[in-house]
């Protein structure tokens, strides 16, 4: 015999949706910080390459060490870009932030009784269905 849960709409929002919103906002913020740090590092390293190139030209006798430094800077840039790409920092910040905002929007519509949550017996089940689909879409990505 199946047991039916008597979870109220407020319990669902407080115990399921609110923690998910907070988690997604935190993950979005972390991804945003990582993305920005990676971009700042890449920019700084890229700006250093012409600087060391000029020094190498000015001091011809020590050209080889500066050439090695420029090569190392280029390698560091490629590595940082690869890590950023592999970690999907840019995409993750968008995905998590949008999901959190969508869930907030659904809760707002539900609490105000706006479409598609006009007062009827299916409002709460529609909310659960829509919010769980948002969560599922993020976890599948």
Image (cartoon, helix red, strand yellow):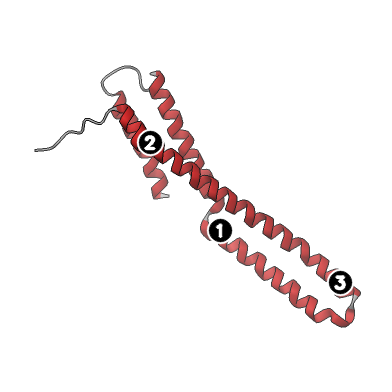
Instruction: Point out which mark residue 85 bears.
Output: 1
Q: Quadrant of residue 131?
A: top left
Identify the residue at horizontal 81%, vertical 70% (top origin). 52
Element type at marker 3? helix
Residue 6 lies, in percent from the top left, at 21, 30
Residue 91, relative to residue 9: is it above or below?
A: below
The residue positioned farthest toward the left in the image shown:
1
* Residue at mark 2 to residue at mark 3: CA–CA distance: 57 Å
Instruction: Inspect this view and state whether residue 124 appears.
Output: yes
Do the residues bearing badges 2 and 1 touch, measured as CB atoms within 8 Å? no
Quadrant in which the N terminus appears? top left
User: Which mark sits nearer the N-terminus, 2 or 3?
Assistant: 2
Residue 107, relative to residue 87: is it above or below?
A: above
Pick whichever, 37 or 11, lies toward us: 11
Residue 61, relative to residue 27: is it above or below?
A: below
* Residue at mark 2 to residue at mark 1: CA–CA distance: 30 Å
The residue singled out by tag 2 in the image is 17
Pick whichever, 3 or 70, lies toward us: 3
Residue 69 lies, in percent from the top left, at 75, 74
Identify the residue at horizontal 42%, vertical 23% (top origin). 109
Instruction: Point out which mark residue 55 bears.
Output: 3
Pick whichever, 127 or 13, lies toward us: 13
Task: Give the mark toward the camera: 2 or 3.
Answer: 2
Identify the residue at horizontal 26%, vertical 21% (top origin). 121
User: Which mark sits nearer the N-terminus, 3 or 1?
Assistant: 3
Q: Quadrant of residue 105?
A: top left
Residue 71 lies, in percent from the top left, at 72, 73
Residue 19, relative to residue 83: is it above or below?
A: above
Would you call the spot at circle 3 few (<14 residues within 10 Å), some (14-19), or many (20 or more)?
Answer: some
Would you call the spot at circle 2 few (<14 residues within 10 Å), some (14-19), or many (20 or more)?
Answer: many
């Amino acid at each position: 015999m199946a047991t039916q849960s008597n979870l109220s709409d407020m319990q669902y929002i407080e115990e399921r949706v609110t923690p998910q919103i907070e988690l997604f906002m935190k993950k979005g913020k972390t991804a945003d910080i990582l993305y920005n740090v990676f971009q700042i590092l890449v920019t700084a390293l890229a700006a250093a390459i012409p600087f060391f190139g000029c020094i190498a030209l000015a001091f011809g006798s020590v050209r080889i060490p500066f050439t090695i430094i420029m090569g190392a800077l280029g390698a560091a840039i490629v590595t940082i870009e690869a890590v950023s790409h592999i970690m999907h920092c840019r995409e993750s910040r968008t995905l998590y932030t949008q999901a959190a905002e969508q869930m907030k929007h659904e809760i707002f519509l539900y609490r105000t009784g706006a479409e598609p949550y006009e007062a009827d017996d299916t409002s709460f089940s529609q909310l659960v269905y829509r919010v769980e689909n948002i969560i599922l879409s993020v976890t599948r990505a």
